[in-house]
Amino acid sequence: MNSYPQHIAVIMDGNGRWAKNRLMPRTVGHVKGAANVRHIVKACNELGISYLTLFAFSSENWRRPADEVSALMGLFLQYLESEVAEMKAAGIRLRVIGDRSAFAPLLQSRIDQAEQDTAHNTRLNLTIAANYGGQWDVLNAMRAWQLANPNKTLQDMDADALAAHLSTADLPDPELLIRTGGESRISNFLLWQTVYTELYFTDLHWPDFDAAALKKALQWYSQRVRRFGRTDEQVSDNPALAPEQSASVLPDLGAGLKIS
């Protein structure tokens, strides 16, 4: 029986190259990529995926040209203003992880409002990683643990204690990470949380990653054997030894899935 992941993480890479290949400005690729977020979110929601985490802007992306960064911030603000009402109606909960202090006050306010407006939704948990870095997340969790335990030392901290202070503390770790754009690295994304995540790399640029491409990634995932450090024989003889957080029947992703 095939299964699909409860939590999918995506590095949405290749917007600029998608535009460059078409002799267009990089910002056009980002606009196209932002539009594709809507399609993939809708597809995941229809498929019953519980958690989707999208890497929208890394802590290293500030190094990009100022006009490109400004365009990305504008697209983020536009997305929040245009999509939240539909997300609320569709049962999607939106959260943003990362260091918000570098964002303009208006963007910070819109993020806060979007999270409040969708806080009670339970169908799909959509997390946007913006000004996020995996190293920042781990360091921030260590500092938060120390503040919460002023009379203890790092010798008293174990993995579970640190994980409880990560920005994703209330989310299951992703079972599948998809990276588009032809690169084969995770680029400081969810470093702690992806310790046993299946990594799927595709040459498709993010604007071209459609429902069919998502189907291909899910089918690839369904064939993986998740051993969690054990042998194939151990898992085969006793599947409970490597419990899936998310084992579910893989639905038919054929023509019946419509993305508008």
Image (cartoon, rainbow, N blue to C red):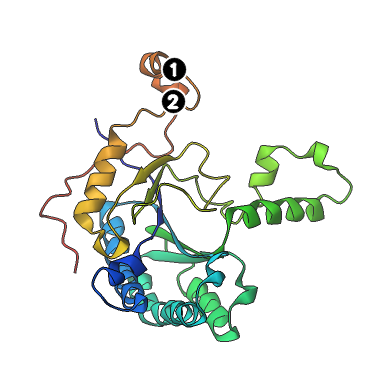
Q: Nearer the viewer, residue 248 or 41?
A: 41
Tag shown at residue 231: 1
Q: Residue at x 52, y 80 (%)?
A: 66
Q: CA distance from mark 2 to mark 1?
A: 6 Å
For label 1, the crowd category at 10 Å Cα-Cα, with few meaning under 14, some 14 to 19 and many 20 or more, is few
Q: Which residue is mark 2?
A: 227
Indicate left or right for 189 with 16 as reference. right
For label 2, the crowd category at 10 Å Cα-Cα, with few meaning under 14, some 14 to 19 and many 20 or more, is some
Q: State if disc 1 and disc 2 touch (CB < 8 Å).
A: yes
Q: Position of residue 258 (x, y in %)?
A: 16, 62
Tell me the element at label 2. Answer: loop
Q: Residue at x 42, y 33 (%)?
A: 244
Up-down relation of residue 51 to residue 2 (above or below): below
Q: Quadrant of the N terminus?
A: top left
Indicate left or right for 78 with 146 as reference. left
Q: Nearer the viewer, residue 131 or 165?
A: 131
The quadrant where residue 157 appears? top right
Q: Position of residue 243 (x, y in %)?
A: 44, 29
Mark 1 residue type? Thr
Task: Using the rendered image of the protein, determine whether residue 3 is visible from the camera's viewpoint.
Answer: no
Furthest-right residue in view?
151
Tag shown at residue 245: none
Tell me the element at label 1. Answer: loop
Q: Quadrant of the C terminus?
A: bottom left
Q: Position of residue 231 (x, y in %)?
A: 44, 17
Q: Residue at x 44, y 38 (%)?
A: 245
Task: Using the rendered image of the protein, determine whether residue 57 is visible from the camera's viewpoint.
Answer: yes
Mark 2 residue type? Arg
Please tell me how many numbered marks the rendered image carries: 2
Q: Residue at x 26, y 68 (%)?
A: 21
Up-down relation of residue 164 to residue 131 (above or below): above
